[in-house]
Image (tube, grey):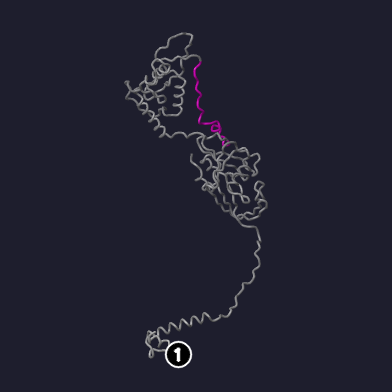
Amino acid sequence: MNAGQRSIRRLANSNAIPSRDTICTSCLLRLSIQTRRHAATATAAAPQPDEPTLQPAPQPPMTNQGPQKAYRLLASAVLSRPPMLTRSLTPFEKAFYLYQKRLNERLVLPFTRYFYHKKGTVADKEWKAKQKTRKSAARDIGVYSGYGDEAWNDEVLVGDSTAEYETQVEALIADAEGRDTVFKEKVVGVEMEGDNKAEEINAEDGAEEEEGERKVVGKELVVERPLARVSEADEKGDTRSLSRKMDRVLYLLVQNKEGVWRFPEDRVYGRESLGQAAERLLVQSCGVNMNTWIVGSHPIGHHVAKFSAPVHARIPPNRLVRTSDTELERNELGEKVFFMKGRIMAGQVDLSGNEYGSQDFAWLAKEEIRERVGGQYWSHVKNMLTER
């Protein structure tokens, strides 16, 4: 400890008030810091008097003076039937596939018959008979000969039916039955005639078969025609049938007791999930004759609507939900509908024993749904529905 520090201690222990006249500035600063430190420690160590604390006045318990206010929570099943047939081709697609077939027709012009059919066999004779009428190895795209005087005339004219589905089906069936595939019509610019019916030759005649001719023994082969794409339900306009619009996705709509068309829907009772509520409401509203599948456990969309005035509702318990055992009473301000995606696997709707008073049902495509539901409801569901 040097002399300056001893002087500071001496001044600190004395009662004299230090000033700039007695000590230097740096010593005066040290003394002031020490004094403040000791004063702060003494203040913290001194006992503080207890301050009276203000206790809040006791409040009376809150009691519900009326029914609870809430939104009506609904689960709705968007039940669909997937397409049964591929959709019809567009004009562009028809032209594209016809181009592919005509390209294949040109590629098989240098067809080596004896590489595929042994000379003198039944297959070789059948090939000669078909080659005589259709001029090439192609089966269902008309007649074209790349080695004749009309080889240049290979354009498909406007209005030609070569690319149409019905024409191709008839050509394939005629080929399978052993008939001529050339009909009395103008095909790719060439007027051709052919027999639609094969000539029956009695096996007992013993006539020898010439090259390029067919011989039919007994009855002709009849190939079953494919079913029409337009069903009987389409012709009658039966919207209840699942056999209509077989190349489109159909959705189930029901007409409730108020006469409003909507997807099947019902309240969510107790602690059931949206998926459980969707499965239950299909049984209670559409019967047990349907085999359905709810896809996933999350909704694919929702619809929110507010009532013009609160609606007083008494909600009885549901017999199929174990967690719903008491009757509820509340004022509902609006409705919130959550849509669950579903598929029908088999069966049909049966409204005879429905518990919601539904009047009618229909299987409709997207554009048909728009004509039956309201504008606000349609704006919330249109993006959930497929175009085809």
- Side of 219 where 351 appears, left or right: right
Answer above or below: position of 290 versus 150: below
Residue 71 screen position, x and y as percent: 59, 54
* Residue that extends furthest to the front in the rendered view of this protein: 1
Instruction: Look at mark 1 in the image and give the residue it sits on.
Output: 14
* Range drawn in magenta: 219-240
Count numbered badges in the picture.
Answer: 1
Q: Is residue 388 magenta?
A: no
Residue 189 image offset from top left, x and y in percent: 36, 24
Nearest the camera: 189 or 78?
78
Disc 1 marks which amino acid?
Answer: Ser
Q: Is residue 184 left or right of residue 301?
A: left
Residue 221 magenta: yes
Which secondary structure type mostly characterizes the magenta part of the structure?
loop
> The N terminus is located in which quarter?
bottom left
**With 15 as the anchor, is 235 left or right in this view?**
right
Residue 115 at x, y = what percent?
37, 21
Q: Position of residue 10 (x, y in %)?
A: 43, 89
What is the crowding at mark 1: few (fewer than 14 residues within 10 Å), some, or many (at least 20)? few
In which image quadrant can residue 67 be found? bottom right
Q: Residue visible at 50% across and 31% down?
A: 229
In this rendered view, identify the residue nearer to me: 376 or 53.
53
Q: Quadrant of residue 239?
A: top right
Element under label 1?
A: loop
148 to 32, vertically: above or below: above
